[in-house]
Image (tube, rainbow, N blue to C red):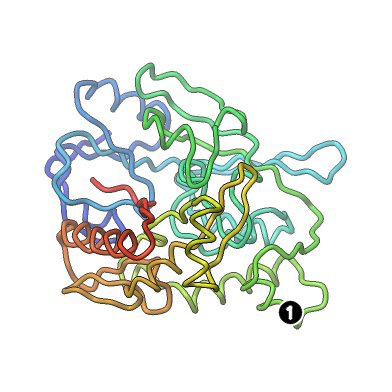
Amino acid sequence: MDYYRQTSLKDYNSFKTEALAKIFCQPKNVKELRECLSEHSAEQKLIIGGGCNLFFTRDFDGLVIHPCIKGLRETWDEDDEDIFIEVNASENWDELVAYCVEQGFAGLENLSLIPGTVGAAPIQNIGAYGVEVKDVIREVVALDMETNEVISFSNVECEFAYRDSIFKRTNKYIVISVVFHLKRTFSYSPKYFDLNKELEDIEDPTIQDVRDAVIRVRERKLPDEKILPNAGSFFKNPYITKEQTEEILKDYPDLPAYLQKDGMMKTSAAFLIDKSGYKGIRVGDIGTYPNQPLIIVNYGSSDGNDIVRFMREIQAAVKDTFNIELEPEVRIY
């Protein structure tokens, strides 16, 4: 396996910020993964998939691993209703969703057009339009970077939470493959207002109808990172108390607020950013996307510190307006 020194990471993060990796490699299988970990055991390590949820503010003084492990296999349950698909981590996420929809395998269609790789999906517990990927994950196979042992994690052992998992919190595993539990029959279940509205003229939406509708909604609201660099939703939707909710509703009666099982209320970061005056705002080469203030976009900067400064402006404005602290969903290096 080849190792590269002082390699540019600009093409390995969707914000297109410039940084150099001290050492860079692209293992194609588990054997090569183990090899690069063993040969560079003293180096700090960073695993990059599609680079759609991170950006750089400085050079990375260590080993950057960009796995290229691909492949897919299918197995059926005896009743022929359940299908299990094991997909290697470097496969493109939306290409997987498209494949499943074409085959009539239900479960991933609401997660259409999310950028990135399959391996990133459980790490971030990606979600959209009323669905989180944890809902359809049966198992995650990962390599422990400390022991070089391959470990299988059940859904429960993944410790999934909102945009979170054991893989994200510990930062000690490399996802090798993900096993999805999908269905061979499909019935549309209304879960999200924008998607319901997009499908309102279709009496009995098919799985393909749902994917097409999700793509239309996303393309209207969200910028293509290949044209306008971004990392998708920049901030997590915050959880606030009922008392906070009631106080905010006095001045903002249209505040979105959804009761959670633990009694907290989940609200919209996009709403808070908008009402704090940062929808469609641009400062230098960084701004919020006019159609969706939750997305920070890069109009031309190669310096990730510009993004950090703008992020802090937004956080300060939301804190001042609502006394709520926004937490970034994006990883910053």
Q: 104 left or right of 23? A: right
- Nearest the eye: 56 or 236: 236
The secondary element bearing badge 1 is classed as: loop
**Residue 321, relative to residue 176: is it above or below?**
below
Q: Residue at x 65, y 71 (%)?
A: 193
**Residue 65, relative to residue 227: is it above or below?**
above
- Nearest the eye: 165 or 228: 165
Q: Position of residue 162 (x, y in %)?
A: 52, 46
Residue occupied by mark 1: 200
Q: Residue at x 52, y 37 (%)?
A: 177
Which quadrant does the N terminus fall into?
top left
Which quadrant does the C terminus fall into?
top left
Amino acid type at circle 1 is: Glu
Q: How many marks?
A: 1
Q: Position of residue 186 (x, y in %)?
A: 79, 59
Q: Position of residue 153 (x, y in %)?
A: 56, 27
**Residue 162, relative to residue 211: is it above or below?**
above
* Residue at the extreme right: 79
Q: In the figure, residue 272 lies in which quadrant? A: bottom left
Q: 272 left or right of 314? A: right
Q: In the figure, residue 216 lies in which quadrant? A: bottom right
- Nearest the eye: 330 or 236: 236
Q: In the figure, residue 195 lies in which quadrant? A: bottom right
Q: Residue at x 32, y 59 (%)?
A: 319
